[in-house]
Structures are given as C-alpha cells and as structure tokens.
Image: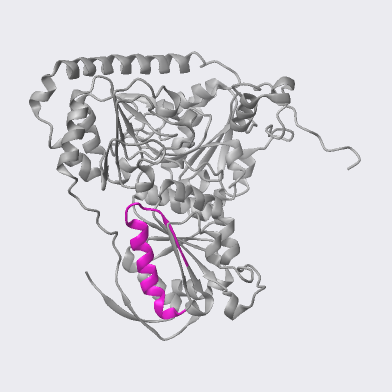
Amino acid sequence: MSRTKVSGTGGEVLMHQLVAQGVEYAFTNTGSAEAGFFDAFLTVPGVQPILLLAESLVLSAADGYAKAANKPSFVNVHLAAGTRQGSGQLQNSYFDGTPMVVTAAMRDNGSFGDHNTLGASGGFSQMGAVEDITKNRWEVTDGGGIAMATRRAFKEAMTMPTGPVYVAYSSPALDQTGIEATIQAAQGLEVAQTPNGGTLEKIHDALLNAENPLVVVGPDVRNSGGTREMLDLVENYALPVAVGFFDYGGFPMQHPNYVGPIDGMSDKGYDVVCCIGYRQNTRASAEDEKFTDAGMIIGIGQDPAMLGNTFALDLDVLGDVNHTLRALNALWKPDHANLAHIQKRKMGLGEQSAARLAKQSDGALSHAKDNPIHPMYLGDAMARNLASNSVVVSENFRAFDHLMPFGYGDNDMSLVRTAGGSLGYGLGSAIGAQLAAPDRPVVLSIGDGGVMYSSSGFWTMARYSLPILTVVWNNMNYQTVRTNFAAWGGNMKDQNKYPETYLGDPAIDFVLLAKAQGIEGEHVHEPGELEAALQRGKDAQATGEPHLLDVHITTIGDGADSTWHKAIAAHL
C-alpha cells in the first residue's frame, strides 16, 4: 500500500489524508474554529466541499451518500454545538450502521477555558455529545496525530459492524504549522471468510427439509454486496422472503418469493426462520418477541448486536453476509430442485405473488379518481411513471412507497432511507444520494412534516444544480402521530381532537418555499393532473434542474377528518 510523506498545517495534513482515502465530498456547515481545515481547500486539491445550511442536513446528506455509494462519507461540523445540532441524524446513522467519519473542531476545557462559546462545559468532554450514537470516538490535541487518527477513524467506520465514528480536532492542532506526516489510506478489517462448515451443513439441511420456512432479509445483504447470492439461495430452496422495518428495498418486491414486511404480517407458524442481515426493530418484551413458535431460528449477519438479542437463535453465523451466502449456496445440488415439497412451494409462491400484485394494482386503481388524491394512487402513479432506475430517497411512514418496484439490479429502482425514525432525514439524504449516483435520477418522496425539519436543503440542491425531483405528500398532518394517538385512545379518540398534529391554518406552500431557494415547482390537486405533473418533473430532471411537486393528498386512518388544533388564548 502506498505511503507518502507530506508537510504542512494540521488542516492540510487532514486534507491530504482525505485525498488518499478517496474522499470526493466533504459535507459541511462552516465554522470559524475549523479555519485551519477550510484553508486547506485552497492548497490541497481533490475534495469538493458541499455546504448545507444546518448540521442536521450535513449528517443526513453524508448518510444518503454512504448508502447510495456504498462507501464511507466524511463530515465536518462546528464544535460541540454543531455536533449536538446534528445529533438527531447521527442517531439515525448509528441505528442503521452507516459508515461515516464525523469531525469537528474542539475547544478543550484545559486550553480554552471552562465556559467557552459553542464548546463543552467545564468538567465535560465534547465526546459526551456523541457517546451513545457513534461506534467509536477520539480527541486529537496535537497536529502530529491528525493523519493517524483520521486513518484510524476510516478503518473503524468501514470494519464490520460498520457505523459512524467521531473525531474532534482541537483548533490549535488544525492551525499548527510545519507538521511532518505519513499519509496512507485505511481499509476496513477483513472479517474471517470461512464460516464453520458444520453449522452451514445444519443450516442447509434445515432449509432443504423445511415444510413452512421463512427468510427475513435486512439491509446488510445489500451492504455486503450479497444480493446475487441472496437470490440464488431463495430461488434454489423456494423460500418465501419478508423484509424488515420499512426496508422495502431489502428484496425485489416484484419477485415471486417476496411475501411482505415482517412487521405487517404474522410471524407465527413457521418451522424454520432464517434471518439474513436483518436489523430488527423490536421491543424487548414477551408480547413483542418474534417467532415464538418457530421450530428453528437461524441468524446470519455481520453485526453481533443484531444476532440473538431480541430472540434466541438455534444456529448462527457471524461474518460477511455475502461470503456466508456464497458458502451456503455451494452446498446446493441441482437434484435438490426435484424434491416434491420444493416444487410445490415454488408453484405456490408464484401464485401468491401474482395474486398479491393484482390486488395491489386493483387497490390503487380503485382510488384513481379520489379527490383529494389518495396516497395509494400517488404511490402507484410514481411506480408507473418514474424512471425504472430511479434512486428513491424516502422520508415517509404512512405513505405508499412500497408500491414502487424496488429491486437489486442497476436498472431497478433502489431505496435509500433510515430506519432510525428521526425526522429531517429526507432532503439531506437526497442530496447525498444524487452526489453518489450522478448518472441516476434521484426522487425524494417526503411527507409535509418531514420537509419542515430540513427545508433549507432546497438551497443546496439549487446551488449545486442537483436534478432531484421532490414529491411532497401533503396532507397537512403529522399522520403517523395522529394515528398512533387514535390507537392510544383516551379523550383524544373520544373527542376526535389530536393536539398539535394538524399542520394547516396556515397551510404551508411548498412550491413557494422551494422557489424562494431557486427551485421551480407546481401544485398538484387533481388526480387527472398527476401523471402529467410527474412527467414534467422528469423533464426538468433531464435538463439537469431540481423540481418540486406539492401533491395534495387526502388524510387516511382514524382521525382523518380532524382539523382541530388548540388556539392560543385571545388575550395573549
């Protein structure tokens, strides 16, 4: 591996290390304490800064980039305060295991004082702001340690289980001059590639002989590059496949073996359950425990925290998912396909898939003339009209993104989203995804509530001419919260009054909001206008311009007719 010697300021050494690491973009919101770093953009070429106007957007953009590019991203935010500003999105990244190196300048208590603007308070460390939402974290107080610490951070972020790491460089370290440093790119540590043969034989036998099996697929299949092996496995053994929490892109949704999201279907009645790369989202209580009547539960994954934590495993393989699947597939023999129960299951999966897709299409078309536009029809229209190779970035919880035909191939739609649940993810993530996939159309599918957490992201889209089509699902509601309130019941349910979930009065004009930041758009009120509007959005993308559709949809679910909100007292 090549090593080079450089000399310069701490900021220049950091920039040399980023160039060697292959970093294309530094996602950032500028701060004065990081002046030594920003000065290096003028002296060390190779890294493009991407300015976002709030730290939460910086973090979500880096997350979207890492997921779409399948490589670690780099972030710089401002001191302890900027770190905290971005912590909601850093929590998402930690929840998802996104490989990122997050950096900031640091004013330490010893050299700057114990009551410093934007810094950690006396007796506390800047590390404390990220202690529970990063894989690892370091402070660097001497410029001579910048190259090594940064290399170590990339190594840690990329090594399974992947995740965000944090490095705080003291401002004097970034400003320090005359530093001699060795620059060398880091690699993630390689996990053992040969799973235990006896365990694999037992898994093979269980899958081969199962009468009613289920495979639950999670994002680590894609993260490991194991999609082809995944398809071979489930097709050979004729295994039905469910996906995890909001992971609609976790398995091709048009595939005959796909049966749905595990959180929306029964988890009972299976003799063999095999979880592969599955990052479960469950409470640790008896009533929420999954697969309680399964004869055998198998776990294959690359994050030990995701294996055997909320339900016990009978067989497990910890290691690179792609390599484990490849080794498992090597045990398959062609004559296994002739087994009667496998043939029968394969036929049954094909029939249920055809019935499911027909029901899905019929359900959407039954709402084709609803006014306001029904969200099911919007999801169906997007599925039929968007480019087949679109990258769809989703920040939707009660929408119908799952109607889009996500798949594994380069010409299939792919999904980028977080399962962490912290709002404000969508706009930044779409920016990062477009930078990671410049030759693919990127579509942001986002609820109206989500937009308002991160609306200054439109400015960054416009500044860098990122041709993102934003589709706002506008029902003037925090619909997820309202429906959860209704399920909770109480006075809210009885009176049909759901405090602070209605977002009208005044209505937010998302077209004007985007236009104020340099992006053209249009309102869509009529279902008959929808397909033409989507086409105009695609046409704008083709010219290299971002575009926004403010699609006015109907509210659905309990409390859908409620527009009540508690007005402030008149005397105030």
Quarter of the image where the N terminus is located: bottom left
Residue 40: quadrant of the picture: bottom left
Q: Quadrant of residue 2?
A: bottom left
| Residue 44 appears anywhere in the view | no
Relative to 107, say whether 420 is above or below.
above
Q: Is residue 48 left or right of residue 315?
A: right
Measured as percent of width and height from the top left, residue 191 is found at 25, 54
The answer to whether residue 569 is above or below residue 110 is above
Tell me, yes or no, if residue 376 can be seen here: yes
Give the image location of residue 432, x and y in percent.
44, 51
Q: Position of residue 346 (x, y in %)?
A: 22, 19
> On the rendered structure, is 146 left or right of 546?
left
Residue furthest toward the right?
Answer: 571
Pick the residue in front: 378 or 154.
Answer: 154
Please state, as top left, top right, bottom left or bottom right, where the C terminus lies in the image: top right
Magenta stretch encompasses residue 153:
yes
Instruction: Indicate yes or no whether the magenta region holds residue 146.
Output: yes
Quarter occupied by residue 153: bottom left
Judging depth in this view, the residue of 562 and 44 nearest the camera is 562
Q: Position of residue 176 (x, y in %)?
A: 47, 82
Q: Nearer the viewer, residue 192 or 180?
A: 192
The reply, left or right, for residue 74 in relation to residue 125 is left
- Residue nearest the observer in this picture, 53 or 342: 342
Q: Is 457 located above or below residue 531 in the figure?
A: below
Q: Is residue 447 left or right of residue 49?
A: right
In the figure, 549 relative to 139: above or below?
A: above
What kind of secondary structure does the magenta stretch mostly adopt?
helix
Specify how the rendered protein is coloured.
one colour
Q: How many marks?
A: 0
Q: Where does the magenta region start and end?
A: 142-167
